[in-house]
Amino acid sequence: MSLNTFGHLFRFTTWGESHGPALGATVDGCPPGIKVDEAMLQHWLDKRRPGQNKNTTQRNEPDAVRILSGVFEGETTGTSIQLMIENTDQRSRDYGDIAETFRPGHADITYHQKYGLRDYRGGGRSSARETAARVAAGGIARAALDALVPGIEIKGYMTRMGEMTLDRTRFDWDAIDQNDFWLPDASAAPAWETYLQKIRKAQNSVGAVVEVVARGVPAGLGAPIYGKLDTDLAAAMMSINAVKGVEIGEGMAAAELMGTDNADEIFMGENGPEYSSNHAGGILGGISTGQDLVVRFAVKPTSSILTPRRSIRRDGTPIEVVTKGRHDPCVGIRAVPVGEAMMACVILDHLMLHRGQVGDGPRGKIG
Amino acid sequence: MSLNTFGHLFRFTTWGESHGPALGATVDGCPPGIKVDEAMLQHWLDKRRPGQNKNTTQRNEPDAVRILSGVFEGETTGTSIQLMIENTDQRSRDYGDIAETFRPGHADITYHQKYGLRDYRGGGRSSARETAARVAAGGIARAALDALVPGIEIKGYMTRMGEMTLDRTRFDWDAIDQNDFWLPDASAAPAWETYLQKIRKAQNSVGAVVEVVARGVPAGLGAPIYGKLDTDLAAAMMSINAVKGVEIGEGMAAAELMGTDNADEIFMGENGPEYSSNHAGGILGGISTGQDLVVRFAVKPTSSILTPRRSIRRDGTPIEVVTKGRHDPCVGIRAVPVGEAMMACVILDHLMLHRGQVGDGPRGKIG
Amino acid sequence: MSLNTFGHLFRFTTWGESHGPALGATVDGCPPGIKVDEAMLQHWLDKRRPGQNKNTTQRNEPDAVRILSGVFEGETTGTSIQLMIENTDQRSRDYGDIAETFRPGHADITYHQKYGLRDYRGGGRSSARETAARVAAGGIARAALDALVPGIEIKGYMTRMGEMTLDRTRFDWDAIDQNDFWLPDASAAPAWETYLQKIRKAQNSVGAVVEVVARGVPAGLGAPIYGKLDTDLAAAMMSINAVKGVEIGEGMAAAELMGTDNADEIFMGENGPEYSSNHAGGILGGISTGQDLVVRFAVKPTSSILTPRRSIRRDGTPIEVVTKGRHDPCVGIRAVPVGEAMMACVILDHLMLHRGQVGDGPRGKIG
Amino acid sequence: MSLNTFGHLFRFTTWGESHGPALGATVDGCPPGIKVDEAMLQHWLDKRRPGQNKNTTQRNEPDAVRILSGVFEGETTGTSIQLMIENTDQRSRDYGDIAETFRPGHADITYHQKYGLRDYRGGGRSSARETAARVAAGGIARAALDALVPGIEIKGYMTRMGEMTLDRTRFDWDAIDQNDFWLPDASAAPAWETYLQKIRKAQNSVGAVVEVVARGVPAGLGAPIYGKLDTDLAAAMMSINAVKGVEIGEGMAAAELMGTDNADEIFMGENGPEYSSNHAGGILGGISTGQDLVVRFAVKPTSSILTPRRSIRRDGTPIEVVTKGRHDPCVGIRAVPVGEAMMACVILDHLMLHRGQVGDGPRGKIG
């Protein structure tokens, strides 16, 4: 079985391979009457788009998204929305040599073992290009959230890349969109870039940690026990290519804490409960508290590197693999807008588990 | 909406509150013809059962499980299986005082905000007692796995508890079941116990990291893109009470690695592909490689402590909360069998996504 | 695979066999704050309960339902509700002789072919006793509908039983609950009873048509394309034991109509649109119009009859089957409350697809 | 909420409106290694295609389908398959006048009431053009069935159209594909055509009954209780535009039978059990018996007619509606290939609930 659908009520099904004619997302369950156009979605796709600076792959895809259904005269109709992105820059010749070879760290071998065949071109279905479809779907989710719960802000940024770590004392929410690494500390970007270029020149790659924060999320979102908000966020982030770990709030470090330290004490503020801290990452019992939602995930170093690695061919014979083609030295950078998109989809989905698609009763007036 | 069901084809729905008459799991989609009895399930429930040693809560529940449906003459029939555990040791008086109070770190406040009412007795639905139902369902999954893929071994153990960490150079798979902390290093248990008792006497609690490993899982399990094996494992573990982080293989540490280090090189072994290492934790592209499946999760310190913490009442007035009642100083210990159970359920579920419930064609012969 | 769950957001999973210790329904997704108690559910179960008059089986089950979870201090909490009915009057000796035999018209042979084993006692899982669990779940749905959309009335009644047909010119909504056949024409009941007793004495059985009508359902319910209101109603009714056909509004007779006759013309009434007729059965494009919802289903004659029928044993040898035990000469009678229950569940489910579980935003106030 | 997905394991999600740029189906869960190409799908689409003879609408769409993903070098890869059909012949001017008007018998009014807005062009999402996507998905299902269970034959045909009824004594399976009405009695076609042309000239339309039969379906398919084979077939057919009733085997007529007549007696044949009759329509207890699967559904007369009918505008004012544009006098004719497609999808889906997507264990060999 293949499970290409994400979400409970706000759902999207992605389709397409890295080097097929197109890829996209079929979005179902979006509330009606939401203003959406292709330019709004393109804004988010451009954040993820490759070939924009020397820190990402030089593959140059316009990633132009088309809305083929579900939007009429600028508004969602409440029916299924088809978002299509055509593939244009396909250098399949770069990949022909892996038809019979399994690249270490890639899904080549497991797709072969599971399905018996695979579209090997550029990783086919297992390529990170699939995440473009998520970003498009996330654009729909952001538009719906803006309309239904004004004031929610969702931003992702890097907190670690190999030896480089974010200095939280210099945290600046507004700086995030102003540097190539989505750093909340613009002054650190040059050092990160120098570090990454050194790794690229060494024909190597490096891992990263991405943190995604949502501000302004109302309390009460989450569907215990198996549709907890943190459960769905963990699934959302772990489903992103190359992700190996997911943390909520304190995350793995919670193991080192005492109960006295970990407790987020509660006070009564002007607009409701407030907390002395946010070790919980904005979630208690799987339900949002109204604090910032804080999710972090680790992205492993790009497996496609120019340094030879030992592997086998389909016939079992040994081979040294050098992955040519154009690859990101740190896929974590482009995972940032993907993490944001998944966060937006999860929040909207849980908002709809509250209010349904159209809210209470019939919507259209007559007479 | 409430989502109390876990799984795709092998599914269980848990029900019940900490201090209601009973709790349990409705298991659906189990293959037919699997030998199951209550004693087999009880074996796993006893691993999780409280009141067994001074490192866990003194609440003493027999946690006796009854099979009410779906099993006939000792074999599963392929229809829904009802597993019921009656609650016996309910000291509700211990909890009456929290009817109007929100305990820091607990779901009291979010359940109130979401639902407008809650069964406050012992945390009601948000109590970790719900995990007993998971362990019972996991017992069914283990029985099915033993029958369908002989040789799969699933074990969980602690790798960290506050300042205590596992010495992996002394790792002993067989020692795991021989000490109160499920440590793969029996010699370390006394020190861990001394440490934990000190914390308990200090009226405090501590967090932990639990690692669950599955050996003998065949290659090819996993349903990309949104039903990846690691995606479902992340959701499974994050849905456990108090879990704040989940890692697969290298986990968060992957962010610190170079691509050259992270690559698990592939060789041809006698029985198929082998790998030089297992940074991937047994999963590539969301599909199992045949290596050990390695999942880790962090459990926050028990929020119920005797040290006073500031909070508010339902009416918004401030209060100092001291959580009486009987609580584990480290819930991570009892999370071990729960993690094992979730691992078993996820593996069986994905096995069934391959082979379906009854395999190819009709099963019963006639004539 | 086994699929024992019905519904999208308001879901119930039934479990249990005819002669096991108990059966029941695990209800998930019910809105919180709904007043529910066992007496309310028992009222509906008693409508379906056997052994009440000489037109139904003499098997005498109290069918007493217990609420084991999800209800606290008389109100639903929004978490999973376990409804359990213990089996008391189990004369398994009546059924021992069918362990090796396949009864014509029963699921004995197909369960054997599919699963390779079956609980043969009283039909096991395929027994119509499973419908008691549906009626209990329907009681929860009715309580929620009463609270969320006051004024919805749901009634089922027979329109045909063999040669007997309802005279619609004498239709009386209030008479339905006042005769053993749920006839909207009490004066007809004696003739129907005479007819049925003649069939019973002839060691035979007869089929029936049941019509279920819901009044006061708001316009706008239904989730096109594959969760249309009529689609879900068709699935709901066809899933009831022995049902062979389902009709909405005009039903199969629509094939004989001209477009000019079939059109329900639209007028503007005081409270919104009104229609000149209801050929559509209250549904257009899979969405409710606000007219009466009208669903009909045909129930085949009871397969368990005292007249010998030819069949085979498990070993393929021929046998003449005479089904002893206590059976309804017309199962259609007791299908009436089951159809009502399914209607109630479908309407509530679609109401929640509109409004979600808790409506817009957090529900519990603080301070 | 909108539910545009059909199926359990073999699932398709349809998208697109009658007059949008394109429509299609996103097919997920198809087994890998199935030979599929666009010509195979086009064969079935051409059966449904309008404008082929004077008995159907003169709207002339090539309905050319493109496979955009999930198929590599002529074989399915086991990942999501995107099937796109571009709309070419869009005479929106024909429909502009209904932007403010609700056509009797159409979904105009309910979509407006539910969603508050609608794509009114040609009925938008509620147009029967959506069924083209089903037929494309059905083509994938047929290819998979041919590969997995050779010998399954699925054919649909008309048994009634207004006053015209099929003479079953002249039933000829091979004649079905040889006349414009898919009649299993070619000699009757001219009379049906004369009758239909008379209705068209009278500016009217007529209803129909379509029967779909599947031969060679193995015993054991079906997932009780709520995923019964007949339950899913009822949902599949009722979800088709204009369908008002669904029957399995004896259908509604079962209400008129005695138990002695209705019993399909069982014999032991050379290749397993055989039956004296097929009142059951090939399904017992929701599971296939191995006999022919027999499903019938009624299609109401086309609501779009040239004879004026009374209705209201969005503002509540009265209007007489005459539906211009090009419409089928009997939509039942083109519903035949749609019913076949849904039958194929349901059978494959249940086959996969047995055997899963890839059968037992890994599929691809190495070495």
Image: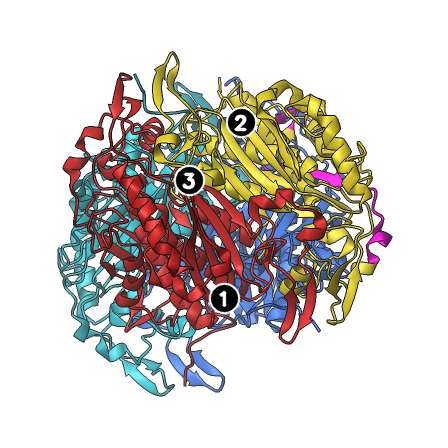
Chain colours: A cyan, B blue, C yellow, D red
Q: Would you say C39 lies left or right of D345 here?
A: right
Q: Is residue B175 above or below residue D189?
A: below
Look at label 1 and name its amino acid.
Answer: His
Could you tell me which secondary element the residue under label 1 belongs to? Answer: helix
Q: 10 Å neighbourhood of mark 2: few (<14), some, or many (≥20)?
A: many
Q: Quadrant of the N terminus of chain C?
A: bottom right
Residue matched to label 1: B354
Q: Residue furthest top?
A: C270
Q: What chain letter is assigned to the residue under label 3?
A: A
Residue matched to label 3: A281
Look at label 2 and name its amino acid.
Answer: Ala
Q: Are marks 3 and 1 on the same chain?
A: no
- Quote the CA–CA distance across marks 1 and 2: 42 Å
- Quote the CA–CA distance across marks 3 and 1: 36 Å
* Percent coordinates x, y for residue C177 in the rendering: 68, 23
- Residues at circles 1 and 2 in contact by the CB criterion of under 8 Å: no
- Quote the CA–CA distance across marks 2 and 3: 46 Å
Please tell me which residue lies in front, A314 or D115. Answer: D115
- Residues at circles 2 and 3 in contact by the CB criterion of under 8 Å: no
Q: Residue at x 29, y 64 (%)?
A: D43
Which quadrant holds residue A323?
bottom left
Please tell me which residue lies in front, B291 or D206. Answer: D206
Q: 10 Å neighbourhood of mark 1: few (<14), some, or many (≥20)?
A: many
Q: Is residue C93 magenta?
A: yes
